[in-house]
Image: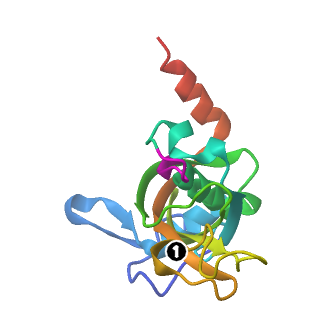
Amino acid sequence: MTQIRGMWDGPPDKAGIYGDFAGGGKWEVGPAVRRARSRVVGMGVAAGQRASVSAVVSDADTAIAAGSGDVPVLATPRLLALAEAAAVAAIAPQLAPGMTSVGTAASLEHRRASPVGAEVVVEAELTEVDGRRLMFSFIAREIARQPGPGAAPGGGAGDAGGAGGDGDEELVVGAGTLERVLVDRAAFLARAASHRP
């Protein structure tokens, strides 16, 4: 039996878990217990886990293709999908068999346009675990390439907003936060199917 001490001053309950009585006599546990529960539910899911995904913007990734605009640049919904993919990759190796995570909230600031042919890398980091609730932060960068021979100095796909062409550099495309929740895959799918008319 594991007892969690130091973050909660109350006595252990019958299961040896530390907590305290809240108003009205209801037993409540502290953050240490919630973290321990999340380790059981998600196995080794812990803050600090990170992963990145990259993509070269194609016509299929543009606002035109997504129906979110009429310009041939990386669509905001596609940028969000890349961020979600990075978040999933960050925790996937640590999930218990049969567990997955589903997206429940997102906040995204799309700061610069990325044209077709641009390489975008999105890194997500798990910043908070609260029971089954997982919070991630992410940042998306465009890898600007130095112009090749014969190209005009300072030109090219990575030169929006005054960035120079003095070697490879990373230009921030966007950033934000994601919330995902750990769920049992089979139970989640069964609930989703039961909502069909």
Q: Is residue 63 above or below residue 166?
A: above
Q: Please tell me in which quadrant of the rendered image residue 145 appears.
A: bottom right
Q: Is residue 72 magenta?
A: yes
Q: Please tell me in which quadrant of the rendered image residue 86 appears.
A: bottom right
Which of these two is toward me, 150 or 25?
Answer: 150
Q: Residue shown at 63%/54% (left/top)?
A: 116
Q: Please tell me in which quadrant of the rendered image residue 50 appears.
A: bottom right
Q: Is residue 185 above or below residue 176?
A: above
Part of the protein shown in magenta? 71-77
Q: Is residue 177 magenta?
A: no
Amino acid at the residue labelled 1 = Val
Q: Taken as a whole, is the magenta stretch helix, strand or loop?
A: loop
Q: Which residue is mark 1?
A: 172
Label 1 Cα neighbours within 10 Å, binned few <14 / some 14-19 / many ≥20:
some
From the top left corner, tell me how far across and down residue 108 is, in percent. Answer: 42, 60
Q: Is residue 39 above or below residue 74?
A: below
